[in-house]
């Protein structure tokens, strides 16, 4: 009888060990959320500034948000000019299958994709609008034209985007790994990144 009991006990332990481990992936994150089950939060100390790049961009920064040694997003800033134009662009590009929470804005340059300016407590998740390509955070163009009689310059300025202001807004992002989705937010102003958070399996 004792042997039968020990056999049943051993079999029960063996079966329990063989049970599949269930890994959960959060289906959303709240803009500004810093804690909770399945949340990874990073606060840069000191703040992370876009740094020197090549001749193409004035400043740039790669972000590896889920700490897997693979860059997830590329931020860059351009200040360029031509004969009578000056341009300022702040953009974010997702690597691989990653995406940006976006909105389509009718701008002076036509319809282009800007990151959605999210407020604290906005939801970022499966039902958000996602874009898997370059997305603008800020765009500005200054044009100077010269008119004769008398010869005087006339300068006009056009701009769109929220990330050169002092508003507290967030960029919504999504990382896709083997068909699994991680949702996150980035807190930045101008060319400085302050902090971010990303969901992770638990």
Image (cartoon, helix red, strand yellow):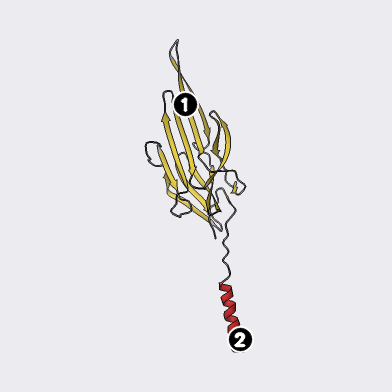
Circle on res. 142: 1
Q: Residue at x 49, y 33 (%)?
A: 139
Residue 25 % position (x, y): 57, 57
- Left or right: residue 177 versus residue 81 is right
Q: Nearer the viewer, residue 143 or 109?
A: 109
- Residue 56 vertical placement versus 150 (above, below): below
Q: Nearer the viewer, residue 77 or 18?
A: 18
Label 2, secondary structure: give it: helix
Q: Quick check: can you spot residue 167?
A: yes
Q: Nearer the viewer, residue 150 or 109?
A: 109
Q: Residue at x 54, y 37 (%)?
A: 114
Residue at the far top in the pictured view: 149
Q: Quick check: can you spot residue 165?
A: no
Q: Nearer the viewer, mark 2 or mark 1?
A: 2
- Residue 7 vertical placement versus 23 (above, below): below
Q: Which residue is mark 2?
A: 4
Q: Residue at x 48, y 42 (%)?
A: 93
Question: How far apart in space, not on screen, are marks 2 and 1 (Cα)?
Answer: 86 Å
- Quarter of the image with the N terminus is bottom right
């Amino acid at each position: 009888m004792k042997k039968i009991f020990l056999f049943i006990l051993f079999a029960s332990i063996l079966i329990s060990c063989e049970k599949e481990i269930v890994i959960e992936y959060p289906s959303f994150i709240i803009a500004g959320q810093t804690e909770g089950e399945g949340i990874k939060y990073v606060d840069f100390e000191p703040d992370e500034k876009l740094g020197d790049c090549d001749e193409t961009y004035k400043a740039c920064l790669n972000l590896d948000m889920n700490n897997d040694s693979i860059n997830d997003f590329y931020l860059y800033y351009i200040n360029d000019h031509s004969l009578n134009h000056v341009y300022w662009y702040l953009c974010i590009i997702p690597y691989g299958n990653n995406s940006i929470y976006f909105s389509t804005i009718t701008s002076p340059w036509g319809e282009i994709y800007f990151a959605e300016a999210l407020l604290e407590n906005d939801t970022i998740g499966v039902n958000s609008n996602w874009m898997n390509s370059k997305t603008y955070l800020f765009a500005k163009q200054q044009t100077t034209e010269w008119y004769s009689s008398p010869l005087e310059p006339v300068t006009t300025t056009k701009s769109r985007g929220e990330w050169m202001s002092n508003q507290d807004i967030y960029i919504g992002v999504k990382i896709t790994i083997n068909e699994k989705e991680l949702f996150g937010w980035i807190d930045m102003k101008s060319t400085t990144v302050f902090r971010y958070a990303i969901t992770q399996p638990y």
